[in-house]
Amino acid sequence: MQGEREISYADVNRDVVRSLVETGSKYYITLGISATVTLLCFFFPWFYQLHYGIGAAGMNQPTVWGTYLASFIFWIGLSHSGTLLSCVLHLTNSEWRKAMYRSAEAMTLFSLLVAATMVMVHVGRPWFVHWAVPYPNQMEMWPNFRSPLMFDVMAITTYLTGSSIFIYMGSIPDFAAVRDRTTGWRHHMYVLLSLGWRGTDTEWHRLGWAYTFLAVLIIPLAVSVHSIVSWDFALSVVPALHQTIFAPYFVVGAIYSGTAGIVTVMYFLRKYMNFEHYITKLHFDNLGKLLLVLSLIWTYINAVELFTGWYSETSFEIEALRYKLFGFYAPLYWEMILFCAVAPLLLISKRFRTSFVPMLILSIAINIGMYTERFLIVATSLSRQYLPDSWRVYVPSFVEISILVGSLAMFITLFLIFVKIFPSVSIYEVKETLPEPEPKPQTKAGVPEWQPTR
Amino acid sequence: MSFIDNFLARWQEYREPGYYKEFDYAWTMTIDLDRCTGCEACVTACQAENNIPIVGERGLAQGREMQWMRIERYWEGEYPDIKLGFIPMLCQHCDAAPCETVCPVSATYHNQDGLNAQVYNRCIGTRSCAVYCPYEVRYFNYNNHHWDAPLDEQLNPDVSVREKGVMEKCTFCIQRIRQAKDTAKDEERRVGDGDVQPACVQTCPAEALVFGDRNDPQSQVSQSMNDPRAYHVLEEVNTAPSVVYLKKVETDAG
Amino acid sequence: MATNALGLFDAPSTALAAAGELKGAGFDTPSVISPIPLHGIEEVLGKKKDVIRRFSFFGGIFGALFGFTLAAGTAVLYLHPTGGRPIIPIPPFLIITYEMTILLGILATVIGFLVSARFPAFRERLYVPEAAVDKFAVAVSCKDAEGYRRAEEIMRGAGAEEIRELEGAD
């Protein structure tokens, strides 16, 4: 099941430890480039914006929201990848998730961190953004919990905490395994992180129970988080945004873009960390099937949105739809439909699903399409609201595009650091997919073969 | 028992939609569209009274206008048979304001006079209130502004100058309302009809704007509200605005 | 002199068999150290109590109460009505309550796990590094040298590769 060669338990330990400890110049060059791009493309333009004001971005009256919020939603959406793969597929006891879920969970964590920085970039006075956090203060002021943005704050804090705890708990046995085979600062770090894990039956039992229960808690949390993010839009009165379909739309879109993100990350992990035997055609096949289903659901929800808008016969709704399909942003809309609804139909073919490079290209195309979807939700709805005198087009500025590129580089940097600290393939879960070791026949002279009574 | 009665009474109070059973003064403005000539004197007066920044040519080209009171122009037809209408649009001070609920730090709320108050120093600039406002009357400070000399000598000392990253909008000249209320309190009376007029109302040459307390049935604004031409803009959005428009009467000449 | 006998096995089946035999022979419940969670261990060593469940449940209850109190209590502390809604509206505060239920449920589960599995381990415990790779170890505490000999005999009979004598507590 795990590729052509038979892998033993010892092989798994050795391969994962090797992925942690052995670093070549290619890794350092990639890390250096992504860190530099983060600095140049994210932090420098952001500092300029802090100095000048949000005016450095392309937003105007009334399109007060732009790519920063679209990026925020995109990164939160990408974070649903890990939750689906880790939690949902854990509860369904699926085998094929075991090699991939650690990296998928890491994607979740880092997407959330990047999304949190996008909030800092987005608000007008980020030095006061801590006022949105409920803490006792000398002003005796508390945030406004009636606000959808406060639901966001609470939900994302919970999700970030939950995801960090989840990835850490699942990694404790792996930290113990790599603790024994590393030296120096790594050894000390893993000694601390593994908490003294030994692998006794009591410890496995407790961990298993806690892990399953965390998975049970995190699944409704993930659904609620992206629903709450969608309600930032849906609880407004803007014609194109005030729709009940938004919560399922966003959740499905999140899982969709997250799964596409996993395909991208798995391709690179497999290629550059020598995990060819652990991440195989089977995994890509299953991910492809999942992507196909999600693509069909996503297409359906888009069709529902169009249909209900048209059926409503309200002038505001019809104008919002007409603008989306045929207005200034029409080329982006049709590009989104092409990448997210039409292109994934290629996944019907098994040959396509099991070829690595085509899957990589499709997954990147899907994520480009999904980013366009988030951008369109923000731009087309705010450009055309109720009063025609206020209709105005929004074009992102150079600073915004640079920060978007920088956020991607930040995510890559965080992930590159992760693969050298956390075991990026879960050792014990991969061992569970391998055949159980058989007892060797007794070779000691004079001792008869012992027959087990159980 | 009295603790429970107390608790229940307060619980009822806190469950009351909008909290206020009635406003202290229910400030309302009526705008007679028949009288409005679109001269934009109100826009200029508002800009002078409230230290509204001068955005400049580049800012305006980017679409970052700052006009707490703006005149919306709608026209039909081709020259010379043009029908032109002006709608002065300002913050409607809605009693069910969508913008108030969404601010995460409570920088905007409904005060006891029925005004939608904006607290500049609490605003962190999420701009969600501007998204939620169906009338688009909220304006964001995209950058710090400065006034070239000698315009900086014209700034109103009763009104703050907002820094970048803060949302602002029409306040019904709350500084004038507060002044009137303070004077009335010193003289131990209520604020009378006509004691307070926002800058736009004071300036309008056609007297198209009327401002006052709709709780007072004798006030000019209450009479004006009873006009059969009265309507609210975007009535169907159910925002319960405090600004009443009087429809322009169209006559088919010839 | 109390000591511990630790036997290394190649396969889970032999390790479990040995553990069963040791338990049957009257030793204190042995612990089985393995690189993966073993199935069938509950039949051999007996079912374990689910203590974490209680932590999660009370964490969730406390979270719900905390969430609603946070939202409603802070709304009441400084009255500022917004949007024609009540000071304590139910739908938004239910969402806050829900999120806090999950957050405190998660934290309580983690605390329950750490407490019941006795983490972090501040002192050295019985362990062999091979058990994290591909060997399965059975550790049992022996009261004296006689007990150690019996344990060694049982484990060798079950097919242990190697027996070690270790000091320390489990």
Image (spheres, helix red, strand yellow):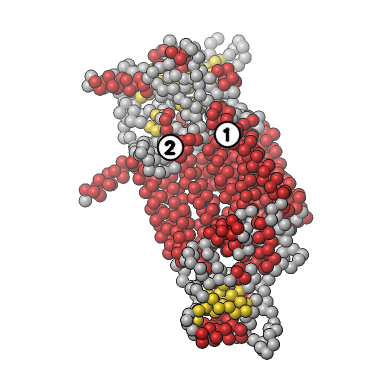
- Residue A201 lies, with reference to residue A133, above or below; the image says below
User: Which disc number belongs to residue A450?
Assistant: none
Please name the residue shown 58% across and 86% down the image. C153
Check disc 1 and report the residue beneath it.
Answer: A46
The residues tagged by marks 2 and 1 sit, at their Cα atoms, a distance apart of: 23 Å
Residue B192 shown left or right of residue A55 in the figure? left
Q: Tell me residue A159's x, y (percent).
A: 52, 50
Nearer to me, B239 or C166? C166
Q: Tell me residue B166's x, y (percent).
A: 47, 29
Q: Tell me residue A70's x, y (percent).
A: 59, 38
Considering the numbered disc 1 on the image, is that residue within a helix, a strand or a loop? Answer: helix
Check disc 2 and report the residue beneath it.
Answer: B105
Query: Dot 1 falls on which chain?
Result: A
Which quadrant holds residue A176?
bottom right
Which quadrant holds residue B113?
top left
- Residue A130 lies, with reference to residue A392, above or below; the image says below
Please name the residue shown 49% across and 50% down the image. A158
Q: Tell me residue C101's x, y (percent).
A: 44, 54
